[in-house]
Image (spheres, grey):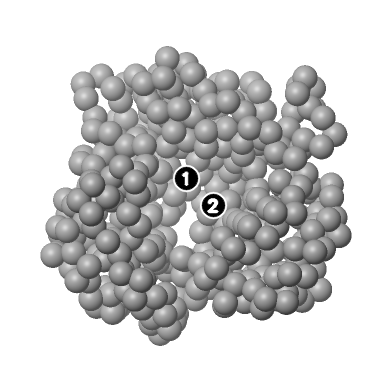
Amino acid sequence: MNSIPHLYVHVPFCPTICPYCDFHVLERRAGLVESYLAELEREAKQLVAKHGTFPLETIYIGGGTPSFLRDAELEQLVSIIRNNFGWASLEATLEVNPGTVTSARASHWFDLGFTRASVGVQSTQDDVLRFLGRTHNTKQALTALETLQSTGFAVSADLITAVPDQNLELDIHTLGRLGLTHISCYTLTIEEGTPFHKQGVKILEEAEAHALEITEPLLETYGLQRYEVSNHAKQGKESLHNTAYWQNKFFYGLGAGAAGHYPQITNNHQHTADIIAMRRTNPHLAPWLEGQRGTPETISRAEFITDGLFNGLRLRAGIDTSELSQRAGLNAQEHFAKAFQTCFERGWLEQNKDMIRCTKAGWWVLNKVVSVFLEQQ
């Protein structure tokens, strides 16, 4: 129940910063990666000392652009994980920028133990890629995907939708014809403080609605089923790591800006009967390099259930409220009886025994669904 079988590692370095990105990313400077790796080793030991180690089921190296690391640097990062957490037979994902892929590098990543590549394609149209500030072109993206596939990776492609002047159908068909096992489709969002926000870039509601309508049926023609709001996969090829997030499982968060989700340690002086878990998000690189870590945020039993619903209702299969109740130590359907009834009456949720999932109408207003539970929390 309290094992931590998943590990996320954040690599904040990128060749360039895209105008829509609001993640913690920065360009590398002399000595910065070396300092990052040294601090990563220290934090790994701290996490193990505090929470212990458990057999890992998934590892996800995200960013940033992890594939931007030089070969020796990525080898060192993998060694840190192996030495502190272990690395047996598991799903190990590396986020990849198409411009960093060569046949030799792909083979090296595979030999290091990575089994899955999540590739930031974003579009297969050069004009759209230029608008998005991407440094690769269509040919590089398609070549990278084919190279990774031929190397043996399970390959997932990220696609941004609702981009001005994008031919989304063309993007979907171009990627679908490659036989990819996983495609993630994310609506372009304009986050405050990003260059796109400062430039006044707007996303048309009709473009967003069009993207939501066509992605599922078009991707189904290539054998990719929507299993989460934004994610589509061939049967058995769903992302195990991301599914762990949506199922509200515990995971280590390692690196600057990384978030972790942990069971509450019972001998901690802050422990009370109502607090069962904690989350912690690390600060950005400069304070993190000085040894600062995020302040733990405690999670009560009721909050654990609302977190579980917010994440689990993103899944087409929905969430097992019996399992969620067992993990929380609180009966979800009894505690939130009024909220459940409200959502059933509005046509947002449907139930089959202990499984509760969003209807199609509920899926597209998920924030409203969860707000009903937050109001009763």
- Residue at 49 percent across and 18 percent down: it is 292
Percent x, y for residue 250? 64, 43
Instruction: Reply above or below: 255 against 88.
Output: above
Rendered image quadrant of residue 77: top left
The answer to whether residue 262 is seen in the rendering is yes
- Residue at 22 percent across and 71 percent down: it is 166
Residue under label 1, please give it: 60
- Residue at 46 percent across and 65 percent down: it is 230
- Residue at 73 percent across and 32 percent down: it is 264
The answer to whether marks 1 and 2 mark residues whose Cβ atoms lie closer than 8 Å is yes
Camera-nearest residue between 253 and 240: 253
Residue under label 2, please give it: 241
Q: Residues within 10 Å of mark 1 (few under 14, many from 20)?
A: many
The answer to whether residue 252 is seen in the rendering is no
Rendered image quadrant of residue 132: bottom left
Q: Quadrant of the N terminus?
A: top right
For this view, does 216 lie left or right of residue 240? left
